Amino acid sequence: MLNLQPISINERVKAIDLMRGFALFGILIVNMLAFHSPFSYIDPYKWFTGNVNESLYSVIDIFVQASFYPLFALLFGYGLAMQFMRAELKSQAFAPLAIKRLVVLLLFGMVHAFLIWYGDILITYALMGLLLIGMIRLPSSWLIGFGLAIYAIPHLLMLVIMFIAVAADPNIYVGYMEIESSIQSYQSGSFAEIFSQRLSDWYASNNIFGLILQAFTILPFLMIGAAAAKWRLIERTAEKRKLWLCLATVPLLIGLALKSTPFLFDTNYAFVYVQDIFGGPLVAIGYAAIIALLAQKSTLQKMLSPIAKVGRMSLTTYITQSVLATLIFYSYGLGLYGQVDLLTGTLIAIGIFIFQLIFAELWFEKFSRGPLEVLWRKWTYGNNFEKTNNSKR
């Protein structure tokens, strides 16, 4: 009989919640570029003008861009594998519940992508999670080996093609018509016009080529995260301290060097690809290691608890960020799309995250889960979720 229950609070790994919280902040900083400007269609190295904005974009590009979604994807795979091992320990079926859970996440993603913001990642996580379920029983070494191969081979081939293409035309594509359409629709268009633009922007990144590229990118992160969970690497941080210290330095330094290549050599799309695809994940590993080590200190753990609470309600946090940002920038809100510079947009992102930290503190005084997490788990676990929640009151 299937009677799996959601993970209880005392089973949570605080370092994982911290990592999720930091990842959500980094993701918001990067997503804000697309919330207030037609980021998908611009050359960012020329769009953000002025010394302050140019310097700020350099910082975001090197330290934030493409370094936090890999961390979140690794944690997504880690969490899925934890649920699998928990089911195995209790001799319970894993796949039916996991599939149901991911289908519910897919529905959240569809609502988010088509009715709130086109830059949704939940659909991709849900679809890649379904693929991971079919591989979850593989040994950790196989998951990592296959994951690295799936990631490295197609991306290295793409990189070679890009450097060949750069020799013919080094300019980053700028979609002038798309930029004009985005500004007109999001800044002053009706809800129907915004929906049409949102659909167009979503498809621009999620056409057949885009979906294949996402599979070669996100699925390997989930696989590597699942392998790490099977080794219980985060739970064994103190035991594996030397490994974590190594991960906190070597990948981070190599990753930051790769992420600096557009500024060291040329801001063409081949070096941007090096930066995002190869530098970003290495920096993500470095950040994960630093957070895991910091979480070993009880004083720091207490200081950073608001961020951990935001991480515990990651679905609520992620979707709320989109709701607040679109209300600020789209025409059915304040209509500020295309009217703020990078500095202002970044400060707004920081303000939104501070609001979420305060909200999480207040929410967790009365409840043990975020509002959307409650809905997600209720739809997944049914009566078992109710019994688990009631037993904690």
Image: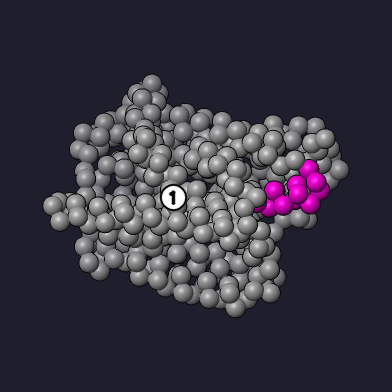
Give the vertical position of 279 relative to 354 (above or below): below
Q: Position of residue 25 (x, y in %)?
A: 50, 54
Tag 1's secondary structure? Answer: helix
The kind of secondary structure the magenta stretch mainly shows is helix
Q: Nearer the viewer, residue 75 or 176?
A: 75
Determine which quarter of the picture holds residue 157: bottom left
**Camera sees residue 196:** yes
Determine which quarter of the picture holds residue 371: top right
Query: Is residue 87 highlighted in magenta?
Result: yes
Q: Quadrant of the N terminus?
A: top right
Left or right of residue 84: residue 129 = left
> On the image, numbered disc 1 is attached to which residue?
217
**Camera sees residue 69:** no
Query: Is residue 257 highlighted in magenta?
Result: no
Residue lying furthest bottom in this view?
A: 242
Q: Kindly identify the residue that appears in the image at 34 percent across and 57 percent down.
A: 156
Left or right of residue 29: residue 134 = right
Q: Position of residue 318 (x, y in %)?
A: 53, 44
Q: Position of residue 225 (x, y in %)?
A: 57, 56
Q: Position of residue 248 (x, y in %)?
A: 52, 72
Q: Kindly identify the residue that appears in the image at 61 percent across and 59 percent down.
A: 140
Q: Nearer the viewer, residue 69 or 101?
A: 101
The residue stretch that appears in magenta = 81-92
Give the vertical position of 218 relative to 256 (above or below): above
Label 1 is placed on what type of residue? Answer: Thr
Q: Nearer the viewer, residue 75 or 36?
A: 75
